[in-house]
């Protein structure tokens, strides 16, 4: 196994490290390091501006079904649009991909009225104005969309379809984590966030604060320490 010949092995998350240890059967576990990816941008939204965000949910990603499961987002939104208390909310989908024509068709099939497909765009303006960022992926390693959205005060909601989600989102504090494939539960959690302004704003503020764990300075220091250990 290649692990036997490596000086160090780096994984994104403690959850991945646990899985990796099972694969290597705990032999020479000192080689294994956990270092997540850093924030994508060096700026964050001022906390006082979170209360001014729009009643908008944003989805950012490739429009591919195998991994991103954008159809799940549309199915969830179909439930949202049936709730008369949520008529002011809209879903904005940013990105393009091989399944976009299918997703356009699906949105029409579901008779969705408050969904906008924006194509491939700079996501920053959308993060700044949206209150919630939704992720519906079947799997991820370390989704950079969260590293982009959280510093902008977006309350993130995701399925628990990958271990690193718990490194990013503390359920009920800076976002929500939903059991994988449970669309009704997802829609309920999303509705709760939409209807509770105080909770949503507080989670957005907490997202900004908790994202500071992943600044380039802090993550860079961990890489520096790793490189230093190679010379010992």
Image (cartoon, helix red, strand yellow):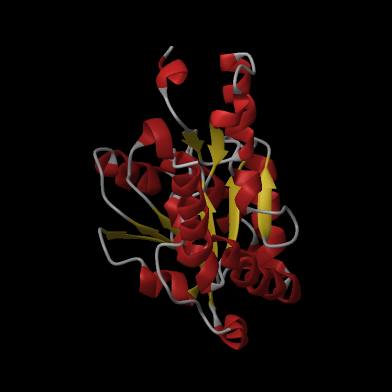
Toward the front, the furthest residue is: 232
Q: Nearer the viewer, residue 111 or 75?
A: 75
Locate residue 196 relative to residue 44 in the image: left or right: right
**Lateral position of residue 162 relative to residue 114, left or right:** right
Where residue 14 appears, x then y in whole percent? 63, 38
Where is residue 170 drawn, in percent x and y?
71, 54
Query: Can residue 131 be seen in the rendering of this structure?
Result: no
The residue drawn where x is 64% and y is 59% is 83
Q: Give 148 or 219, whichever is nearer the viewer.
A: 219
Residue under the point 37% across and 50% down: 61
Does residue 165 show up?
Answer: yes
Rendering quarter of residue 204: bottom right
Looking at the rendering, which quadrant does residue 199 occupy? Answer: bottom right
Quadrant housing the N terminus = top left
Q: Position of residue 58 (x, y in %)?
A: 46, 62
For image coordinates 71% across by 68% down, the residue present is 195
Question: Vertically, is 85 above or below 76?
Answer: below
Snapshot quadrant of residue 103: top left
Residue 158, x across and y down, in percent: 59, 47
Residue occupying image coordinates x 58% and y 42%: 164
Q: Does 78 sit above or below residue 139? A: below
């Amino acid at each position: 196994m290649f692990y036997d010949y490596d000086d160090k092995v780096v994984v994104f998350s403690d959850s991945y490290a646990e899985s990796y240890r099972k694969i290597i059967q705990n032999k020479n576990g000192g080689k294994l390091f956990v270092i997540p990816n850093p924030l994508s941008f060096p700026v964050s939204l001022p906390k006082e501006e979170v209360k001014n965000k729009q009643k908008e949910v944003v989805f950012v990603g490739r429009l591919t079904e195998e991994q991103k499961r954008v159809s799940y987002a549309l199915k969830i939104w179909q439930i949202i649009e049936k709730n008369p208390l949520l008529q002011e909310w809209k879903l904005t989908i940013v990105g393009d991909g091989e399944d976009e024509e299918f997703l356009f068709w699906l949105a029409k099939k579901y008779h969705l009225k408050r969904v906008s497909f924006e194509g491939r765009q700079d996501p920053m303006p959308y993060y700044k104005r949206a209150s919630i960022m939704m992720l519906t992926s079947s799997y991820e390693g370390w989704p950079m969309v969260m590293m982009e959205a959280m510093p902008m005060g977006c309350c993130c909601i995701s399925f628990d379809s990958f271990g690193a989600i718990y490194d990013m989102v503390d359920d009920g504090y800076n976002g929500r984590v939903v059991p994988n494939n449970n669309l009704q539960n997802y829609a309920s959690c999303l509705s709760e966030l939409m209807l509770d302004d105080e909770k949503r704003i507080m989670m957005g503020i907490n997202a900004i604060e908790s994202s500071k764990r992943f600044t380039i300075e802090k993550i860079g220091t961990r890489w520096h320490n790793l490189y230093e250990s190679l010379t010992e």
